[in-house]
Image (spheres, rainbow, N blue to C red):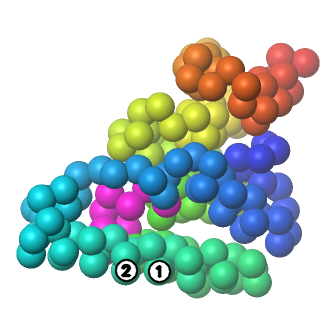
Amino acid sequence: CEDDLPAAGKRRADRAARDVARSGAADHRAADHTGADPARGGEDGSEADGLKKEADNLVAEALEMLNVDNFVGANAKLEKAGKIYPEHLDSIFLLAVGAYLNRDFKSAEARFKECLQRAPENVAALNNVAVCEIQTKRYASAVKHWEKAAGIDLENSSVAQNLGQFIS
């Protein structure tokens, strides 16, 4: 599906990177599982900030690998980012995109839902869950996700386009 789940070639990585930026994933501040509180600062905050920065660097490396069609290497970097900083929304989102591109719709849906647990109003994740649900013939659920996405961002062209493709 158009912008959120790209179809082929080098454009996959470029569009996936734009999706992460557009989804607000990079700006999402979620609690981490390290016990550190980044908002407090100090030693714990510095540790969490360092882990997030390391995960950000791994995601950047993964995006470069995607640009040269190194999907296995990119996946490994994204998995590592998720282990270092489990709440890293960018890595979860991109792993979901990768699962979708490999036609593993159930895994993709699970990863996009994981994104929604951290950012319930993430329009790109809502749209992509709906697309995965269409692929697995769960139409009523897909429509509910698109309705929620449209309620958050009525002007989102990806939601409109995907819903339009579904009803036509």
Q: Position of residue 46 (x, y in %)?
A: 19, 74
Quadrant the C terminus occupies: top right
Answer with left or right where residue 154 lies relative to residue 60: right
Q: Is residue 89 above or below residue 116?
A: below
- Is mark 2 in CB contact (under 8 Å) with mark 1? yes
Q: Is residue 139 above or below residue 30?
A: above
Label 1 sits on what residue type? Asn
| Mark 1 crowd level (few <14, some 14–19, many ≥20, 10 Å Cα) | some
**To which quarter of the image does residue 42 belong?**
bottom left
Residue 28 in sight in this render: yes
For the residues marked 2 and 1, what is the alpha-carbon distance in whole angstroms? 5 Å
Q: Name the residue: 36% across, 39% down.
A: 117
Q: Does the magenta stretch include residue 167?
A: no
Disc tally is 2
Q: Is residue 105 above or below residue 148?
A: below
The residue labelled by disc 2 is 54
State the SS at label 1.
helix
Q: Which is more toward the observer, 1 or 35? A: 35
The magenta stretch spans which residues? 82-90
